[in-house]
Image (spheres, rainbow, N blue to C red):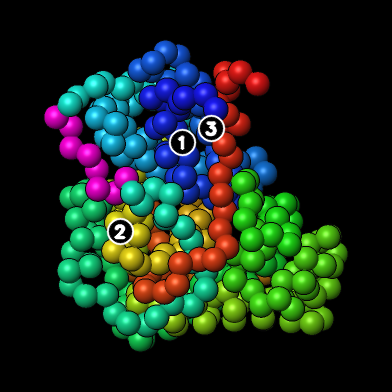
Amino acid sequence: METQNLIEKIIEHARWAPSGDNMQTWRFEIINDHHFVVHGFDTRDHCVYDLNGHASQLALGALLESIAIAASEFLHRSEFKLRSDTPESKPTIDVFLTHTPEVKQDPLFACLALRSVQRRMMLAKPLDSTQKQALQESIGRFYSVIWMESFANRCQTAWLMARNAKLRLTLPEAFPTHSTVIEWNSRFSDDKIPDQAVGLDPIATRLMKWAMKSWARVDILNRYFFGTLLPRIELDLLPGFFCAAHFALVAEHEATSVEDYLQAGRAMQRFWLAAAKLGLQLQPEMTPLIFSTYVRKNLKFTEVPKLLVLANQLEKSLANLLGTENAKKTVFMGRIGQGQVAKSRSLRLSVKELTLNQNP
């Protein structure tokens, strides 16, 4: 086995950064021993959840933070330069590494590959003040945390998530994503979500596999057999009740540029890694933010009128939960708590598969 060089070692650890549906919307190009390029791309053309590429940009920010953390382990600082001559749909970032013996190794390094998504129920044991302080400190002074942790708050948020689930599960424009991102009969997947990690019981999983063969099957289940009821209960309502808290990461100002979303992604990753370091489990809850942004920006995302009405109702519910201004400035939402480490999870493509100029 060939010995990895410095950049390959950094990529080996950084590649565990989260991305929507495990898309891994980046590739690497090694220029020399201390310079490589991150070629980002987004999925806005075919994924309704990647509004203007923002979800992919958040993920890319998480990757950059992971690179910085991994570089520190090898006593290097990393400098990032976003190229101004590349389109927003393909953000391209030069990464320069500088050997600095006195650099402090980041204590979150050990959590890069451990961090994962837990879609199943957690304990409802509240977070203590020390845990919440560590999580707040992890994201720096430009972001704050709103906690929804009382029973009433958890119920309100769980119901919001269940209603959002009805929107996404009955949305024809979401079917191309739902039908392609799951790897069936799998505990692990290099580039998708294994079905065992989704959080459904075996019977519901088999039904979902059958339905995902075509939109006509999904539509039949939804129209005549309450097809969204079981997954909404298992994936949204019950997990929403059984957790320590739901949370929102709120920026000082509303994110508008690629740079804003990259910085938000870096904060998101540090929060998630800090949670892993505390032994806590986490699940993102991003659809309320995505669809409320469609509504606020007056952007049409479906041809189904009743779903547009539902989205408007959900936008108001989110504003009621977080406050109108906070809802605009929220960059990440999720639920958190103590629980078992996920037994099934998404893996990642190898360094060779992610690097453009690797020799075969």
Task: Give the residues in magenta.
Answer: 102-109
Q: Quadrant of the C terminus?
A: top right
Measured from the top left, where is residue 317 in percent x and y? 44, 73
Q: Is residue 240 above or below residue 25?
A: below
Residues at discs 1 and 3 in contact (Cβ within 8 Å): yes
Q: Is residue 163 above or below residue 143?
A: below
Quadrant of the rendered structure where residue 218 is? bottom right
Measured from the top left, where is residue 307 in percent x and y? 65, 66
Q: Mark 2: which secondary structure?
A: helix
Crowdedness of circle 2 by 10 Å Cα count: few (<14), some, many (20+)?
Answer: some
Q: Which residue is mark 3?
A: 351
Q: Is residue 94 magenta?
A: no
| Spatial CA span between label 3 and label 2 | 25 Å
Residue type highlighted by circle 2: Lys
| Spatial CA span between label 2 and label 1 | 20 Å
Task: Tell me the residue at 52%/61% (across/down).
Answer: 287
Q: Mark 1: which secondary structure?
A: helix
Q: Which residue is mark 2?
A: 277
Q: Which residue is mark 1?
A: 12
Query: In the picture provided, is 334 more to the left or to the right than 168?
Result: left
Quadrant of the rendered structure where residue 105 is? top left
Residue type highlighted by circle 1: Glu
Q: Nearer the viewer, residue 333 or 234?
A: 234
Q: Mark 3: which secondary structure?
A: helix
